[in-house]
Image (cartoon, rainbow, N blue to C red):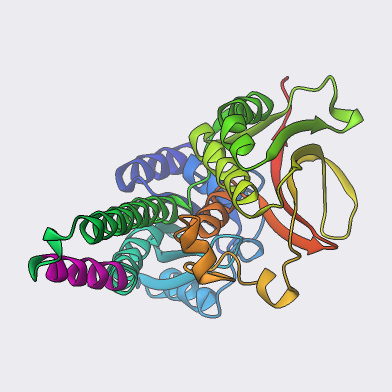
Amino acid sequence: MDEVNKRFESMAALVDEASLLLDAQSIVVQANEKALTLLGNYIIGYPIDRFLRHADFAEAVRMAHEDGRPSSLDYTLMDQVRRSFTLRIARFDEVHVMLVIFDGTMSLSVDRIRSDFVANVSHELRSPLTALSGFIETLQDGAIDDGESRDRFLTIMRAEAGRMQRLIDDLLSLSRVEAEEHRPPDDTVAILPVLRELVSAMRDEAAKNGKTLSVNLADELADADLLVRGAQDELRQVFQNLVENAVRYGAPETTISILLSTGRLAGGQLRENLLRVQVVNQGETIAPEHLARLTERFYRIDKGRSRQFGGTGLGLAIVKHIVNRHRGRLRISSEDGQTTVSVTLPRIFQQ
């Protein structure tokens, strides 16, 4: 068996993909680190169909054993983030077959993201570009000599150009996040300093809009290290976006609260391995028919109001994909003039 293991390790290193060795009963007898990361550290000694379910898998293994014919199967893993794989099965020796799992998520995502990016840019930039062309034509027709009209047109043109720049920046940000969504980050982030730094940076902007910001911890978290597995810049982007929305759309002379507490499951049960961050603001209640669609790209409840405040309609879509990448959960609720956006993240504890 030592010789078999050595051969398997050599071949697995050669293909550099998630690789497994299966016996005649399709029980996993060996797996490399990538396979353990993908399917779980406990897979060795168990039938592979506990972890990969495919209608044609058993037949592919049979052909590899009996006929020596390799097979290739497409496989989709429906998790929080959809992932696409190609399973390749071939005879390893008289007793074993080798399974190699090729992750094709990235290539499929890049093709889709490229297509979506072109479609979104062509659609969303049409209006500001048409407006700019109209103003330029009017100025060329003589309005440039009318100081009042010229200044008004130039102000509008600058605003439209700024809107296009924000739109392109957000589309690029969304594309980057979507491309990496299937790869969870592996850094350790202390969430409280991130939130306090954000509040400090945004306090003046909130004050201009007649609002105050506060960070509050539930009693059980008062002395805890609030650590999550994540990417600090992305998490800051999530909460900056949520606070900016609260500043824009919340009622004047109110407090925007950032509340940290122990996470809960969908049924309401407390889970100490989860951390919940809620951004709560006072203002107009969002109707239920809008809540489910707020994370769709370019979905706006009031398009005119959103553009007036400089919104691109992409902020919550970016938030959703970042939260998905962190294997967290996003929930938005609104009732009685209070809107709460909850982000629940897996929490880690120092040893």
Q: Choose top left, top right, bottom left or bottom right for residue 151.
A: bottom left
Position of residue 252 measured from the top left corner of the image (x, y, whole percent): 70, 48
Confirm whether residue 159 shows in the render: yes
- Quadrant of image for the C terminus: top right
Residue 147 appears left or right of 63:
left
Position of residue 239 measured from the top left corner of the image (x, y, whole percent): 60, 42
Whether 332 is drawn above or below 225: the answer is below
Whether 68 is drawn above or below 209: the answer is below
Position of residue 74 measured from the top left corner of the image (x, y, whole percent): 42, 73
Q: Nearer the viewer, residue 159 or 299?
A: 159
Q: Nearer the viewer, residue 83 or 70?
A: 83
Q: Nearer the viewer, residue 66 or 134?
A: 134
Q: Choose top left, top right, bottom left or bottom right for residue 140.
A: bottom left
Position of residue 18 measured from the top left corner of the image (x, y, whole percent): 44, 50
Tell me which residue sits at (89%, 55%) in the image: 268
- Residues in magenta, as a range: 126-139
Residue 229 appears left or right of 137:
right
Q: Is residue 129 magenta?
A: yes
Q: State whether the magenta stretch is mostly helix, strand or loop.
A: helix
Tell me which residue sits at (91%, 29%) in the image: 219
Confirm whether residue 299 shows in the render: no
Total marks in image = 0
Q: Is residue 8 magenta?
A: no
Q: Nearer the viewer, residue 320 or 327?
A: 320
Tell me which residue sits at (58%, 54%) in the image: 324
